[in-house]
Each structure stands twice: as C-alpha cells, then as structure tokens.
Amino acid sequence: MTQEYSPSELLICLASRVMEDGSTAFIGTGIPMLAASLAQAMHAPNLVPVFEFGGTGAILEKLPLAVGDMRTYNKGIAASGICDIMETSQRGFIEFGFLGGAQIDRYGNLNSTVIGDHAKPKVRLPGSGGGNDVGSACWRTIAIMIHDKRRFMEKIDFVTTPGFLTSPNAREEAGLPKGTGPYRVVTNLCTMGYDEETKQMMLLSLNPGVTVDDVIENTGFELLMAEEITHNDPPTSKELKILREEVDPDGLYRK
Amino acid sequence: MQFAFNLTEFLSFDTERSLLSRFINYLIFKLTFETLSNSPETFIKHIPMSENKKWIPVVAEGEAPLIQPVDLDAFRDHNRKKSKALIDKTMTEEEAIVKFVNDGDYIGFELYGTVRCPMSLTRALVRSGKKDFRIVGQGVHELDLLFAADLVREIDFTYIGLEVFGISGNMRRRVEDGSVKRIVEWSNAALTWRFKAASMGIPFIPSRSMLGTDTFKKSSAIAVECPFTGDRVALLPALIVDTGFIHVHRADKHGNCQIDGISGFAFEMSRACKNLIISAEEIVETDEIRKHPDKTIIPYYLVDAVVHAPYASWPGEMSGLHERDDDHYKMYVQQQKTQEGMDAYMKEWVYDLPDHKALLDKIGKEKLQELTLKED
C-alpha cells in the first residue's frame, strides 16, 4: 500500500537515496539537511555531513535551521571554520555537494544571483554564498530544483555556479579541478543525469505518475533521453516514518 | 630503457641555449622523465614550467574595480602603530562607533546566518548617523538594518538573504532602486580567502573557485596561468577592512577573545581589520583567558574596543548560550516585505531605543529566559 506524501517529502527521499554510506557531503540549508539526516537513519549511517561554517561529521538528530547553527556540529567530530571546510573541499575530500538556484541550463550551470541585467536587475537574488565553491570543488554535485520552463532554461541570466559551463571540456579549460562537475538533478518530476560525451542534461528516471511528455513540456531546452528511462519508487513507509517522526517532527520543511 | 625522439618537442626545448647543449639537456630530460613515468604528458607539462617562469600570463579579468584598495604597506604601518599595551578597552557600543567609524568606511561583520551576529553594534551604527558605507557581506539581519536605513553604497557581495526565510526585501529594494551604487560578486570561500591573504600580509591568494562563471566576470579577481602547473587559477586580491565588528562568547578588558563551537571566519577577518570592535556576552578576568589559551581566537593586540553585550546576537542565536528567537523572526519576515512595514520595525526596534540595555528591557526577562539554553 502506498502512503500519501507531499512533493517535498518525495524530493527529500530522492536526494537522500543518492548519498552513499561512508562518503562526505557538503550540506546547505533546507532539503539537503533533511536528505542527509534521512540517509544517516536509512542506508548511510557513516555519511559525514560537512557544513560550510565549520561543522564536520554531525549526527543530525535535530534539524539544523541554518548552515552555521550549533546542530551542524551536534556530536560532531570537528568544529572549525569556513576556511577549513572550503580548503578541505578544494583539496578533494568532499564527494557530494548540494546546490539550488532560480535557473539552470542544459550544462547544469546555476543562477542564484540576478534575474535580468546585473547592473539593472529585475530581481536581485541572494548571490553565490558557498554555491560557487561547492560547484567548483566537490566531486559530484546534485541540484535540487522545482521543474518548470522558467527555471530550466536555454540561456540563464547569470552563471553564478559552474556546471559543465559551455562544452564537455570547458570546466578544465577554465581551470576547475579535473573530474568534478554536475552529477544529478533531482526535481518534483524526475531525476536527470548528464550524458558522458556531451555533458548535457539527460532524463534518467521519472517520479511516480509523471510521463516523459510532462518532463519535456516543463523543460525549456532539448533534454537528452537515457536509453532506458526508469521509474523512481515512491517514498517507502519506513522513509516517511523516519522523516516525519525523527528527522523533522515539527514539519518545518516537509510541506 | 627506451624513449622516442620527438622533433617538435626538441625544437621547443630550452630555446635560449646552443644546439649542442639543447640536445644534451633534451636527452637528459627525456631519459629522466620518460623512463621514470613513461608518460608523454609529464614531459609536455614540464615545458611551460621553465618557460613561464619569466611572466605570468593573465587569461581573464573580472570587470569590477576594487572597492577597497590593497595597500599592504599602509596596513603594516597601521599595525605597527597600534598599541600593544595591556590597557582597558571596554566602552559602550556608541563610544566605540564614534571613535572608530567614519562616513564612507569599508566595514565588515562576521557571522554565519543568524548565528553570533554583532546586532547590538549594528543597531548602534544605524542610530549613529554615520553613512555611505562600503561593506563586505555575508549578510542576514545586520545588513538588512543597514539597507533599511539606506547606509550602503558599495558591496563586495557573496550572500545576502534571510536563509530559510527567503530573499531579503530590504536588499532587493536598495539594489533594485539604485541606492547601492556598485555590487561586486564573490563566493563565500573567495571572500574568506581574501581576508586570509590580508591576514598573511600578502597581496593576493590563488584559488580554484570562481573560474569560468559570471560570478568571476562581475568580480575584481584575475585569472592567470599558474607558473608552476600551467593550469588556470583565480587570483583573489587581499581584503583589508577599515572597521570590523565581531561578537564573541567571552573577552577580557584588553580584547583577548574566545569563541565556543565553530568559528566561521572570525580568525581570518579579525586579522584583516585596521580597527576591530568586539562585543562579548561576558567580560572575564585575563586569568580566565589564560586557563584556556588554546581557545583564544582573537588576541588583544588586534582589538580596539571591547563592549559588554549579553544577548547581542538577538534575535539570532549564540552557540551553547541561547537559541534563535523564531517568533521575532517570523514577525520580522512579514514586516520587511514592504517599506512601510520595515519603517515601523526600525522605529520600534532600533530608533526608539537608546541603547542595547533598553532593547533587552523591551524583549523582557521572561523571553530571554525562554531562549536561554539549559545545561543538560
């Protein structure tokens, strides 16, 4: 029997399943925190969450409200500062990085800086923060997005955070560390990856009840298709129980 | 042992020497590298090393001018003149701002999100009437108050927003209506490394962030070919702050400061400030500091003023001491959506209160008690 669940709960479960046990993940505010906490309780007890302002290896019993609050180093193994975390990432220790943004393009470049012209913005957004650093130095980044045409665009207004930039080799040519880059895009409709050769976004699997046409209709660029498109399992009753009772009992982020 | 003679490689090798010595050097080089690594890449990668030692080619430049010049010698002179005596530096927020802040200064706040933010100093700064600041942010509630009061002209920008509560209405209004004249983009790591460069007393620091993006294009960074590896790196200019504000758990009257839990960028920024104003939850005897010298993040000689300000991070939190006041934040988030709402908030919570003590009285003992963490 399938339980009812909200779109956020589905996103959290999908993001959580991507994280591997015994690896490191750079965690930002919101859904990534819940996903990491759920992953620790489900399949990845040895996942080491890393928070940008210095928290390393926290046991996420209580949901952090911000990337610098004391829950980001709850029973942690180290409480240092932003330089330590950013430098650890720059030397190749952080496997997964989570990202978000107002706009994304086929190469996984993200905009969180400005809608419209930089000098005369229509909407000024919060800016890079640690996003550019996560997108530059983490081995594999996972973008979590709401899926619609205003966000999945042919040309985004501003490249805040690097994806594969403009071509398969553009990251390395720009000087970004070898072998790094976008890995997955998790949305309310589907999960996407990137084509090995062209480094362009590719549909991998569909969320329950979603069709390929739904995805195409809501994507503003031509999306590549994997040879076999699979289906994402809905949240299990165990995932939902842990999420609702342990990870976020107050329902701060689940709506 | 074998290697392949490659004419193109040979012709580009050690071009300033005579043909014979070039040939001998080339043989030595090939024997050394190709028998050691058997990788043609190793050889190719080493050619630019010897050639590029003469200059560093600039491959890209950010468009934005520096909004705070890098003057290391002036910084050294300033630091030399700074008193190293163990004097009493305690004073009020208002006294510190009169003494150490001027119109047009480049100012910095250290914080992470709503955590350990120097809010009592921020409110005093807003009330002081000083204006036209250039700022470095990382900003949440403190920069919101400065935007609301229209005190910001130029920004080295990384993140300004309300975290889980969304976009800052105050920041949007001031940026979109042109009150803020110039915005220069950076990443969090880039700004912290810029402090680190100033802290090291060097003019710039290389980094692998920012490259290939519009964030770089709208910054004042420069990308060069690294003279050692040949790869592109971003050079981030040192950032020297005129006056910095940091809130800490405890300090003595001389300015020796300790922070519990994570320390954000307090270490780097405190060393990148010409003037540094500290607020502290608790003023302790120097003997207390000496019991745990390993916890001293900021030594006294960096500090110009010490302000005793319990709950100074309110409505944000202070690790180990008190929680964030979410009730107040929720109210604030509603208020800041419109200019009228924000004006009313500023009148009630900033302008109508003469000092930090008046604010604490207004919040009330009961609320403060509720926010205080109980020892387990």
Image: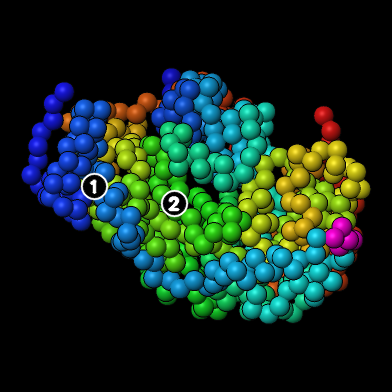
- B19 displayed left or right of A235: left
Residue B295 placed where, x, y %? 76, 41
Above/below status of A157 relative to A72: below
Residue B304: image quadrant is bottom right
Indicate the quadrant containing the C terminus of chain B: top left, top right, bottom left or bottom right. top right
Find numbered disc 2 in the image and state the secondary structure of the residue it sits on.
strand
Sequence order check, earlier mark of 1 and 2: 1
Counting labels gives: 2
Find numbered disc 1 in the image and state the secondary structure of the residue it sits on.
helix
Look at mark 1 in the image and give the residue it sits on.
B47
Report the predominant secondary structure element of the magenta stretch: loop
How would you rate the neighbour count of disc 1 (Cα within 10 Å): few for under 14, some for 14-19, many for 20 or more?
some
Q: Which mark is residue A34?
A: none
Range covered by the magenta-colored residues? B85-89
Residue depicted at x 74% and y 79%: B129
B114 or B12: which is nearer to us? Answer: B12
Residue A241 placed where, x, y %? 56, 24
Q: Are marks 1 and 2 on the same chain?
A: yes
Label 1 vs label 2: CA separation?
A: 23 Å
Indicate the quadrant containing the N terminus of chain B: top left, top right, bottom left or bottom right. top left
How would you rate the neighbour count of disc 2 (Cα within 10 Å): few for under 14, some for 14-19, many for 20 or more?
many
- A11 displayed left or right of A181: right
Look at mark 2 in the image and give the residue it sits on.
B207
Amino acid marked by disc 1: Ile
| Residue A167 in view | yes
Task: Give the label, 1 or 2, closer to the camera.
Answer: 1
Residue B100: image quadrant is bottom right
